[in-house]
Image (cartoon, helix red, strand yellow):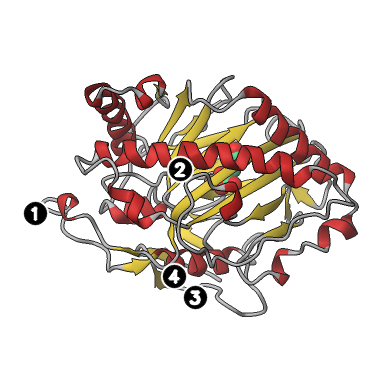
Amino acid sequence: MAYTGPNDHGSHIDTGIGGIRKIQTSPSGASGTFSSIPIIDLTDATSPSLEARKKVAQHIYDACVNVGFFYIKNHGVEEEVIEGVKHEAKRFFHDLSDDDKMQLDISKNTEFYGYAPIRANNTGAQTKKRMFESINFGYEPSMDPGASGTADNGPSFWPSEEKLPSFKDNVGKYYSAVMGLSRQLLHLFALALNLEETFFDQYCKKPGVLLKLNHYPAAIPESADNSGIHAHSDLESFTILLQDSVSSLEVLSKDGVWIPADPIPGTFVVNIGDAMSMWTNDLFLSTIHRAYNEEGKVRYSVPFFFGADYDAVMETLPSCIDEARPLKYSPITAGEHVRMKLSMTYPKDGVGSGKAGEKVGGGVEVLAA
Ligand SMILES: O=C(O)CCC(=O)C(=O)O
Ligand SMILES: [Fe+2]
């Protein structure tokens, strides 16, 4: 299903990630015209031939500058591991009591890791509850096959072994697999940008990552709407999204059409986030998307947000600046960028909520707190 009109909730959008913005299709208004989301075969991403890897990178380049979203197939993550994390997501949301889940309350965590219950929009613009709950897990060096350096991204809240036996182990297997895949994608992004294949590695030794489990319940009570996750862009460098079989995700094209990104078996959806868009001076698009519960079916999704080391300074790549594309962004550490935007998503008693008209990080205009 595709909807016309830029946004069916008025002229401003709830980013879900960073307060309310004017409708726009990228942090700074850059956007792409597209009518479908490309599927990219990663078989040759690990080819010994540089030429073959560059061909894959060229497809990624095209997708990043035109759409900001693409599916990947033949990504190498084992089916069993994928089924494992889906199973654990169901256990988390259904086997734990509300009290158990609130023990992991995100508002008690310094780094915005933890559980966020079904709640009304945190910005106050929407009074009805949004029908999704989620839990975020932060960077875990023990789950990163490529870890180097000492991470200081703060501790995650995990359910105890007693409450949910083997949960951390099984989620950890998925986490490690997508962590490895992320490092492969980093190489492809570098090749796509005509950089040394390992260019981004130096910024991603202990990366700021979030593995999030989302649950969209089937039943929509009177006190809620079916909106799920409202229109937003992701804030990290890129996202690897695992969907179940229920359609929900839609991506906004420049002409205001919501293009479905329905689940395709055997694939992940990858999208560029605000940080990579800033890094590339908006050459790579951080495209607005949303996930509404239109079908009234229970749905789970597992986004893995990958960003640079919190102490890495993201400075716009010189090759992405020219007369037609003048420099738009000041250098910022990945940590400052992420913490600022997460604090607007999950405000804590007046801390960090965006103010009307405030310019944040990537030049995003925040219109209401
Ligand atoms: O559930 C989905 O399909 C998308 C979720 C999403 O966009 C997010 O959590 O940022
Ligand atoms: Fe998202």
Locate residue 344: give its quadrant.
Answer: bottom right
Q: Earlier in the sequence, mark 4 or mark 1?
A: 1
For residue 6, the mark is 2
Farthest residue, direction left: 323
Task: Identify the residue position indicated by label 1 in the image.
Answer: 323
Q: Mark 4 points at which residue?
A: 336
Q: Nearer the viewer, mark 3 or mark 4?
A: 4
- Please state which amino acid type lies under the numbered disc 2: Pro
Q: How far apart are marks 1 and 3 (CA)?
A: 32 Å
Closest to the observer, 103 or 67: 103
Q: Earlier in the sequence, mark 2 or mark 4?
A: 2
Along the line of sight, which residue is nearer the eye, 367 or 137? 137
Pick whichever of labels 1 and 3 is earlier in the sequence. 1
Q: In the image, what residue occupies the spot 36% across and 35% down?
A: 67
Residue 49 lies, in percent from the top left, at 26, 22
The three-letter code of the residue at mark 4 reads Glu
Q: Is residue 32 visible?
A: no
> Residue at position x 80%, y 54% from top?
159
Residue 149 at what x, y percent from top left? 45, 61
Q: Does the residue labelled 1 lie within 8 Å of ligand 2?
A: no
Query: Which one is closest to the eye, mark 4 or mark 1?
Result: 4
Q: What element carries label 1?
A: loop
Q: Which amino acid does label 3 sit on?
A: Lys
Q: Can residue 196 be seen in this view?
A: yes
Distance from Cα at disc 4 to Cα at disc 1: 29 Å
Closer to the chain start, of discs 2 and 1, is: 2
Crowding at mark 4 (Cα within 10 Å: few <14, some 14-19, many 20+) = some
Identify residue for label 3. 355
Instruction: Please provide percent x and percent y for residue 285.
Output: 34, 44
Provide the secondary structure element on which disc 3 rests.
Answer: loop
